Amino acid sequence: MGRKITDDLDALLEALPPHISEPLRQREDRSELLEVVMDLGRKPSARFFSHELILSSKDVTGEDLQYVVSHIGAFGDDNRAGIERTLHRISAIRNRKGRIIGLTCRVGRAVYGTIKIIEDLIQSGKNLLLLGAPGVGKTTMLREVARVLAGDFKKRVVIVDTSNEIAGDGDIPHPAIGQARRMQVPTPTMQHAVMIEAVENHMPEVIVIDEIGTELEAMAARTIAERGVQLIGTAHGTNLGNLMMNPTLSDLIGGIQTVTLGDEEARRRGTQKSVLERKAPPTFGMVVEIQSWDRVGVHRDVAKVVDAILRGELVALEIRALDESGELRVEEAASPDIEQGRKVAGSDKFIRLYPYGISRSHLEHAAKEMGASLSIVHNLQEADALVTLRSYYRRKTAPLREAEELGVPIYVLKSNTVLQIEQLLANILDTSGRTDPLTLALKEAEEAIDRVMREEENIVELSPQRASIRRLQHQLAERYNLVSHSLGKEPRRRVRISRADV
């Protein structure tokens, strides 16, 4: 079937104050509306795919916010509400006393005919995990998956709907899920319990779950998979590499553990004695990385891919795309380095940097002097690394927190000079063709653990790392009953590993 989009936009416009909704009613491009933002004391704005628009010359008042609240459903513990029988989502910002001082009114759209690109994969009966950047269409595709499996393939499908994003607000689910059944979750912290309840009480053949994000939810997903129920869900992260670096969610792809090899086996493999290995079969046998509605990357055998990455091998990614006529084209990507989301082509050294507080002209000048191929990006999803100054790093502003969540390496400079930047580029160029900073840091920790356990050294201090990497180094030490402490101040804070009796 061809692609069909329904947005129930009139229902959302009715929930907005007239002086805010009227300018939108008059626009011909309202089908491209993403969300309406209303913050107390500021002018209301509308965000479209390509631009932003101020909707009124008047600042938003408390009465305007209350008008919206009175026309929508009740807010849950996650500060989200909806409009009955629609897919729209209204999220609240509250002050310290709990009063609403801001609203984000996001347009929810049902897009029919989006899963041709992965239809054979969901029909296979294997567990399938969808990954992708926020707003790329994970939930939209998940909704269509539920409808097709329940309708076209006559499966018993149960949706675990945490924030009513898949099937809409109210007791009657949105028609976009077809014959699939929906279980609402009373509070986000209960999502894992409802997942298990769905299996035990309703005999599903397929469970559909959006945003697996906690350890309990990952454990519930594994329980469901072990009971022979097909599981199709989404998780935080843009690619498989992100998932591997996430200690909470790595269990979805089998989990990662440190194994100490014997001398003979280590020589045979040509590795250190302590190596990283997958510790269990993956909960999800296939992973789909959504790049856009018309383009995805597919890992058909997650176990094989994870094992290859842990051995330091490059892996191929199956790229699927729909052409202008709607025909599916399948090709194989040229050895992508999925841990950092970049392609390695022979000996070419290409760096994509996200500068934060760093002079663009200094970056370009330093790259020219060194003969480095440098691209300055403005989206962290596309960056190989973020570079910033120490003063910015200490503040832990939103871009830095986002980079840590995405696993993007952060490089901190003392000063915004060409010399400092040249030294940084030399460091990146020296490692970009071999191993990323996370792998280097974990290998350093493994070698330190090996030296301490063999009593070659009593105490080993590791190189300075950011907090997320130090946490993984502490976990490695804990597995071997060793003591680890963090010492020093950022950005020179580092881990010290020792025996318990030292």
Image (cartoon, rainbow, N blue to C red):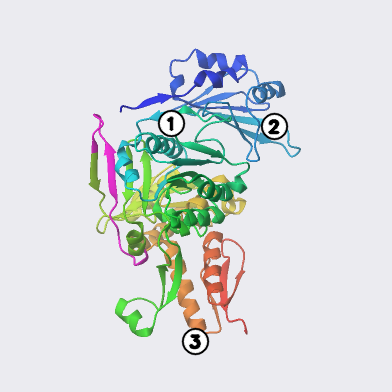
Q: Identify the residue at image location x=37%, y=38%.
A: 154
Q: Secondary structure at mark 1?
A: loop
Taking depth in this image into account, of 468 and 25 the one nearest to the observer is 25
Q: Secondary structure at mark 2?
A: strand
Would residue 295 appear left or right of 444 to someone viewing this image?
A: left
* In magenta segment, residue 317: yes
The correct choice, above or below, for 302 with respect to 129 in the image is below
Disc nearest the viewer among 3 and 2: 2
Quadrant of the snapshot with the C terminus = bottom right
Residue 469 location, x and y as percent?
A: 51, 62
Mark 2 lies on residue: 100
Q: Identify the residue at image location x=34%, y=31%.
A: 113
The correct choice, above or below, for 337 with respect to 293 in the image is below
Q: Is residue 51 visible?
A: yes
Q: Identify the residue at image location x=43%, y=71%.
A: 443
For marks 3 and 1, give the CA distance.
65 Å
Residue 456 is tagged as 3
Q: Which residues are magenta?
A: 310-328
Would residue 248 appear left or right of 394 to someone viewing this image?
A: left
Residue 178 is tagged as 1
Mark 1: few, some, or many residues within 10 Å (few <14, many ≥20)?
Answer: some
* In magenta segment, residue 133: no
Quadrant of the snapshot with the N terminus = top left
Q: Earlier in the sequence, mark 3 or mark 1?
A: 1
Residue 18 location, x and y as percent?
A: 61, 14
